[in-house]
Image: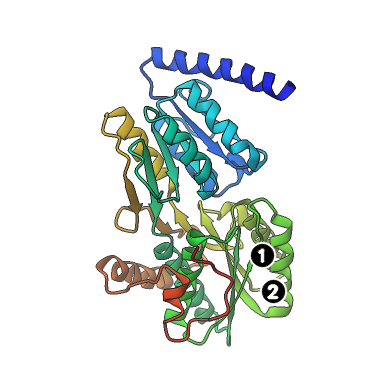
Amino acid sequence: MVVAMALAITGCEKKNAAETASRTEEVTVRLLTDSTGIDDKSYNASAWRGILDFYGDSWDSQTKRGLAYDVITAQTEDMYLPNLMQVTDEGYDLIVVAGFTFEAPLVQVAGNNPGQKYLIVDVGLEGDFPNVMQAAYAEHEGSYLVGAAAALKAKEDGIVNPRFGFIGGVPDPVITKFEVGFVQGVLSVLPGAGFIDYYVNSWDEPALAKTQAKNWFDIGGVYAIYSAAGHSGNGVIAQAKEYRLAGRNVWAIGVDSDQYEEGLYSDTESAVLTSMLKRVETSLVYALEAVQNNTFEGELITFDLVQEGVGYSTANAALSNSIVIQLEAIKQQIISGEIVIAQTYEDAKRLPGFPQNLKALDN
């Protein structure tokens, strides 16, 4: 009863906010996230940044929050559906759900509310949903680049027989694109490199990722670890920071947002060599502009290197100019089609030298 009353009160507050915003002719939007929220310094943060950009706000100055835009964070998965139903009833111009874990609730709610516009990131829905815009990303392209970056750095450092690690959140085809793209990028530079992977099975368990990273750095001889695990991946960065501060030559590779600052262990040194930039904000701005311009369609759009939907960070000076020049050449080869990157584990396993014992899943 208390929960129901709280939801009802919150619903009234949100309706008033929506009505106020509509009077100012502002597009209204609500972002729904998992328990990691917009402070995950990764995936959700990138989505939130897109909303801020659209409204001319910033992380430090969110002047239109609560009116034009806001975020609803579900502390548990069983709240995904009721949260989605609640914001749908409140009648915002656009509702955004971040991540494939929202797919089933969205299919249920969107089908029953054809007049409401939705955006889902990272999912291509099966079926006809003219009111749902679907944003996909070429994660394999950006991951290939950071894999090549890590391998080029190992080569520059003179590391003999380097090993590389990948830590994922919850296994699914999207995270597989991160992993197989990364592995292919490393192998393009170091064909004999070794690999190991681990899945946390959670987006919000950084302690588990940190423990695994420590084991790999200590026992497995791993040089660099790439994580695509939401907030869990921050555990990898934390462990790499500790070891680089102690003089160990190990690296973390960030994801989604530029995690350079998260890896700082001195004023000018970061344990995050580079980050795969998955510019989720690009799809948020695209969808909001479509709503504003009355051009919104239920379409699947893939944001790739050409559209600057993915990329890599050059914030760390440890990523030398020589490496960046080589990465830019690789980037152009991907754009031109000279380099073709496998997106599934099934296809990647057919490539010469690709590891056959990874934990990646295609479905």
For image coordinates 39% across by 47% down, the residue present is 135
**Apparent side of residue 77 relative to residue 132 in the rendered image (left or right):** right
Count of numbered circles on the image: 2
Quarter of the picture containing the N terminus is top right
Could you tell me the amino acid type at mark 2?
Answer: Phe
For image coordinates 37% across by 71% down, the residue present is 341
For image coordinates 47% across by 72% down, the residue present is 345
Across and down, in percent, residue 159 comes to: 57, 83
- Indicate whether 316 appears above or below 354: above
Using the image, tell me which numbered label, if any, was put on residue 240. Answer: 1
| Label 2 environment density (alpha carbons within 10 Å; few <14, some 14–19, many ≥20) | many
Circle 2: element type: helix
When asked about the image quadrant of residue 210, the answer is bottom right
- Indicate whether 242 appears above or below 125: below
Circle 1: element type: helix
Across and down, in percent, residue 219 comes to: 73, 79
Q: CA distance from mark 2 to mark 1?
A: 9 Å
Who is closer to the viewer here, 30 or 150? 30
Across and down, in percent, residue 20 comes to: 46, 13
**Apparent side of residue 194 relative to residue 69 in the rendered image (left or right):** right
When asked about the image quadrant of residue 37, the answer is top right
Q: Contact, CB < 8 Å: mark 2 with mark 1? A: yes
Across and down, in percent, residue 304 comes to: 34, 57
**Apparent side of residue 339 relative to residue 310 in the rendered image (left or right):** left
Who is closer to the viewer here, 223 or 144? 144
Asked if one can make out residue 240 in the rendered structure from this viewpoint, the answer is: yes
**Apparent side of residue 12 relative to residue 320 in the rendered image (left or right):** right
> Which residue lies under the disc numbered 2?
217
